[in-house]
Amino acid sequence: MFKSIYFRLVATYLTLFLAVVIIISFFSTSLFYTEFTNQREDNLINAAEKTNSLMERYYNNEITKTELTAWIDAMGYISNIKIYILNPDATISSQVSTNDELSVNEQLRADIVSAMGGERVLRMTSVSIEPDAEEVVYIATPLKYDDAVSGVIMIFSPFTEMNNLLRSAIITIITVVVIVVLIGIIGILRVSINISNPIKQISEYARNIGKGVDVPDVEINTGDEIALLGNSFNEMKNEIQKTEQMRKEIVANVSHELRTPLTSIIGFIKGILDGVIPKEDESKYLNIAYDEAKRLKDLTTDIVDVAKLESGNVKLNKEEFVLNDLIHNVYVELGDMVKEKNLEFILDEKVKDIKVFADRARIKQVLINILNNSLKFTDKGSISILVEKEGSKAKVVMSDTGIGIQKDKTQYVFNKFFTANDYGDATKGAGLGLNIVKNIIDMHGGTIDIQSEEGKGTTVTITF
Ligand SMILES: Nc1ncnc2c1ncn2[C@@H]1O[C@H](COP(=O)(O)OP(=O)(O)O)[C@@H](O)[C@H]1O
Ligand SMILES: [Mg+2]
């Protein structure tokens, strides 16, 4: 569990996040506190200086006692402070801006003595002052007149006021921090789930595929690299499933195609060996067995060819040659068989000496496969070959007047192991020929088209 990506993501993010939040709130709080205290100090110092200058003006008879009192009262009221003017012996000489008695404790006395000595004393941490034990901060500063210390100015400011302000500031900061942390945690959890869930799903699917179980596509809609991984995984999975499906089909088809002829070959040979077949019929059955064995050989060649072409490992042996010459060869090779069936064999060369750059042996295989089909499925009429050019390409049209192919089946004739009809033993094939043809034409960057009408005939056109 501690090794899971989810856990590690959450732990890393959370640690980082909390560290940042704690550092920021600590610094902002202490900054706020320092700033607040500094300002408080400045206020007290300003008020003390202002009081000192008012006292000077009073001593110089520039303002009356009433004016002095009014000014200091106003200042104390506005700033919520208490201002005392003390005699050198620490008795109150004028008590302004407040009616409270000043009860002098030990520390205060010591500070007053220091102030008498010309020193300014600031107490910014809360001090408790009798009689009502109010928490205060204060300044004790010498009252200067004519370069001499003639008393002490004492100014108190309530601590609670400052405390309250600080507290509400800290509460605000904490609230903001908590909200930010909560939002952050939710975000972190979501991001982590978005990363770890798809990975878990993909690995689970991968395990199932390994066991040969079919799985649906993984669905990841995050639009990021993980989604990309999901897409690639789906592509890979579909490819594997397709291949697996194909493998199953081929194994099933191939074993069927091989078993049928083998069974009859074994049957005939055993019949002869056991003497079940009469001596005079032996050569007849041996001939059948021979034909079946030959067909089996062609079939194995085709099966291997299909597998090779499909794997993409076949390299074309391209060379320049005259297509018409190749066609003449094929025409001669098949001529006897066409004549045997009493069919007309027509060769129509619209263009002579068509030079092509192609794999001669493979193109021959294409022509023979197509014409063999015509031969197989045509009993009367003709088989014709037309050669011409189409643009820079060569075009061969092969037509017959045979049985044709049912309309709805024409589209499947290029599939492996597809045979449109069961026409009986004479025409029995494994359905690999046109698949091989199409693969070879595709490898040459050419096109192949088949048109057929049931009962009328079939036309196959190739360009390459
Ligand atoms: N000239 C044709 N006339 C009628 N049917 C054809 C012709 N060519 C192909 N077909 C149909 O297409 C199928 C697939 O052809 P092919 O791949 O060569 O396999 P096969 O010859 O082994 O049957 C044939 O079984 C047949 O039904
Ligand atoms: Mg064929």
Image (cartoon, rainbow, N blue to C red):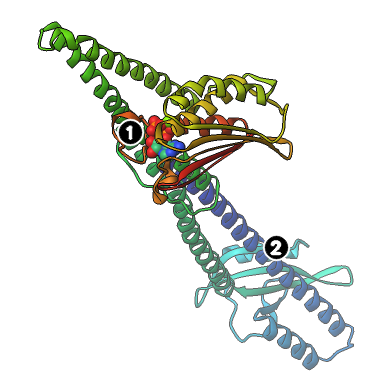
Q: Is residue 365 left or right of residue 300?
A: right
The quadrant in which the N terminus is found is top left
Q: Secondary structure at mark 2?
A: strand
Quadrant of the displayed image that contains ligand 1: top left
| Number of numbered discs visible in the structure rendering | 2
Q: CA distance from mark 1 to mark 2?
A: 100 Å
Residue 276's spot in the image, x, y percent?
10, 12
Q: Is residue 256 above or below residue 268?
A: below
Name the residue that disc number 2 marks.
121
Question: What quarter of the picture does the C terminus occupy?
Answer: top right
User: Can you say whether 457 is above or below 29 in the image?
Assistant: above
Q: Nearer the viewer, residue 171 or 262?
A: 262
Residue ID for mark 1: 249
Q: Amino acid at mark 2?
A: Val
* Few, some or many residues within 10 Å of mark 2 (<14, 14–19, 20+): some
* Residue 374 point in image, percent of width and height: 46, 34
Instruction: Respond yes or no on whether mark 2 lies under 8 Å from ligand 1.
Output: no
What numbered label is drawn on residue 235?
A: none
Question: Where, by quadrant of the figure, is residue 138 drawn?
Answer: bottom right
Q: What amino acid does circle 1 point to?
A: Glu
303 relative to 329 in the view: left or right: left
For image coordinates 71% across by 61% down, the residue present is: 114
Secondary structure category for the residue under label 1: helix
